[in-house]
Image (cartoon, rainbow, N blue to C red):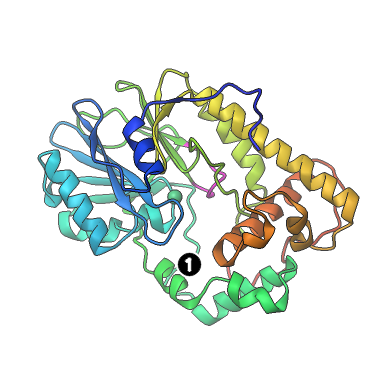
Amino acid sequence: MNSPSLAPITLTGHAQKEAWQNNVLPAVEQLGTEVWSIPIPFPGNPMRYTLSYLLLGDGDAVLIDPGWDSDAGLDHLTAGLRQAGLGLTDLTGVVVTHFHSDHLGMAARLRMASGAWVALGDREVRRFTDADDPDLVLRTHREELTLWGVPPNRLTEVSMDHRSLIHLQNLADPDLRFTDGALVPAKGLDLRVVNTPGHSPGHICLVDEPHGLIFSGDHVLPRISPHIALDLPWLANPLADYYESLKLIAFEDEMEVCPAHEYRFTGMQRRVAQLLEHNRQRSVEVLQVLEAHRPATVWDIAQHLTWSRGWKSLQAFSLRLAVSETASHVVYLRAQGHDIDVPVTDPDPVVR
Ligand SMILES: [Zn+2]
């Protein structure tokens, strides 16, 4: 849905794009003398891999987004570090842009192997801890989906399963929390934290001005528009947050954007303009569906929206994301003053 009238971004990760098109894992790349890009496989997911970045300081070695936890992932990471002349034990810090498994996944294992600290933004929310009763969490989750109109015969398919919940409960807790504007504590690095909520409540980007690099996590990706979920009950209006934080990260177009997926590019301001426009068009489409079909639930709205491979192609996890994204548009539009009589907020969430 990107408007053709908006200026395109400029590809810089040519080898990465080629690898993407050939459906293979991109190679490890050195970006300047002190920065490395190390792809880590993300099995069973259309994103295919997470781009992990290694930054070498003055005796410090910091990894951004270690990626999905698997033995194969650890092998890829170890091989990438070796190319940079390092072993796992040389890592001194792990910065994670947000609390999702394909970013934080391997952090616990790396901390154990190296003693490195693990850091997240100070606003990031851990959705589940091992203190939560999985049965209660899943029941509440299904109630949310029911409120959004997910039909009973699709509930099991759409909702999170027990296995993924346990996985989320076992993700590493951070040792450090970074505030907006903080400098990552590593000698010889000049890496500044920018709070960029939207994709998650405490997502951060990292700006390395000396190298002219922006590590954008999932906040800004070159090809897809990041998923902005209504993740009850913490996010009041994630789309409004996303719009605000897109503007915060619209640094000069000359800086190279190093995203956590897909490939590198320059043209942050151009990409921000595209993402704002994409989401604005989506909101307009939601309003048109409300007018034309008088839907009673978020699910009813979602099935009338345009999806890249069609509504019928959406299944399981991708269907949940679609419904949750639609819910965040409803919340946003309601806050803009539109009178939308579709339930989105559980009045009394059991699990917080
Ligand atoms: Zn991701």
Kind of residue at disc 1: Phe
Nearer-the-camera pick, 282 or 54: 282
Q: Is residue 199 magenta?
A: yes
The x, y position of residue 48, in whole percent, is: 39, 52
Q: Residue lying at the far bottom in this picture: please name it.
A: 135
Q: Is residue 178 above or below residue 129?
A: above
Q: Is residue 9 left or right of residue 111?
A: right
Q: Is residue 266 magenta?
A: no
Nearer-the-camera pick, 70 or 308: 308
Q: Is residue 227 left or right of residue 286?
A: left
Regarding residue 103, the answer to whether it shows in the image is yes
Crowdedness of circle 1 by 10 Å Cα count: few (<14), some, many (20+)?
some
Q: Residue lying at the far front in this picture: please name it.
A: 22
Residue in view at x 74 percent, y 51 percent: 305
Q: Which residue is mark 1?
A: 128
Q: Is residue 342 left or right of residue 130?
A: right
Regarding residue 133, the answer to whether it shows in the image is no
Q: Is residue 117 above or below residue 319?
A: above
Q: Quadrant of residue 22?
A: top left
The N terminus - image quarter: top right
The number of numbered badges drawn on the structure is: 1
Q: Mark 1: which secondary structure?
A: loop
The x, y position of residue 255, in whole percent, is: 40, 21
Residue in view at x 17 percent, y 51 percent: 78
The x, y position of residue 214, in whole percent, is: 39, 30
The x, y position of residue 241, in whole percent, is: 61, 41
Q: Quadrant of residue 164?
A: bottom left
Residue span colored magenta = 195-202
